[in-house]
Image (tube, rainbow, N blue to C red):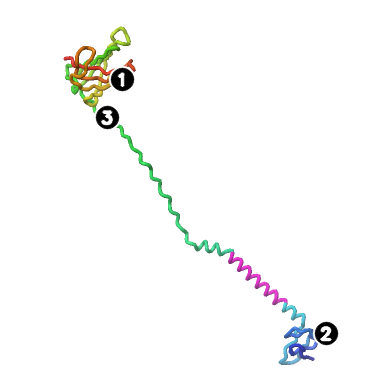
Amino acid sequence: MSGICPSCGARIATGDRFCVECGHALSGAPEQVTVATGPSTQPQPVSSQKRNGVILGLIAAGLLVLGIGAFQVMQQNTEAPERLAAKAPSVPMRPAPAAVPERSEVVRAPPPQPELGCGNLIAPGEKMVCAASEPNWDIEFSCTQTKLTSIFTDVFSSPDLLKTPGTATLSSQNPWVIRTSQGLAGTIGATPGSCRSDFDGTFDFTFTPSVVPGLKHPETICCWIVR
């Protein structure tokens, strides 16, 4: 037997506790399931227990769908900065400007002066004598062809005359830069008639020594030609 739902007017089966359409609680006999014995156009009655299971299944499926959607949203928010960073164009780093070395002034040594022949100062066969007093010493130069010889006479370091023979070289000219094998060095300049010595007279050459063996502060002396 079937009836009508007092709430919505839908058809209900005998023994249903709830209306299939609106869920209205029904009072009646214990729960039964009526199965049609032949073809019928009426819907099959559904038990309330099965209907409750369908409702719980739909609720669980909805919660699962919501959970998956929330997880996908959270994952997209987490990966968004990484994707933006990957898509952002990389800016090439400009190399630092190379340091410009400071210019330093290169001090070049003057080229060595070629050795002059002794004929530029003394004619062959002549002698040049440069003498000093207090302390007493002198240097004598002679020219034989192109070789310049020297004799250093030391009177201040011994009561005897100490004569040391040697050789000399010339570089530059007027003043002539001279250096001897005895360790004496200096310059000789042409000063016609202006160099006066203690030997009474004026002479044409002036010797300005820079190094004299045995003397700390040698003084400028006069030189003359002996023919």
Left or right? Give the position of 60 relative to 90: right
Span colored in magenta: 56-77
Q: Secondary structure at mark 2?
A: loop
Quarter the N terminus occupies? bottom right
Going 19% across and 14% down the picture, which residue do you hit? 201
Q: Which residue is mark 1?
A: 211
Percent position of residue 83, x then y = 53, 64
Along the viewing direction, whichever of 16 and 25 lies nearer the viewer: 25
Q: Which residue is mark 3?
A: 112
Mark 1 neighbour density, 10 Å: few (under 14) some (14–19) many (20 or more): some
Q: Is residue 199 magenta?
A: no
Q: Is residue 66 magenta?
A: yes
The kind of residue tagged 2 is: Pro
Label 1, label 2: how many angstroms apart (C-alpha)?
Answer: 145 Å
Quarter the C terminus occupies? top left
Prevailing secondary structure of the magenta residues: helix
The kind of residue tagged 1 is: Val
Percent position of residue 162, x then y = 29, 10
Mark 2 neighbour density, 10 Å: few (under 14) some (14–19) many (20 or more): few
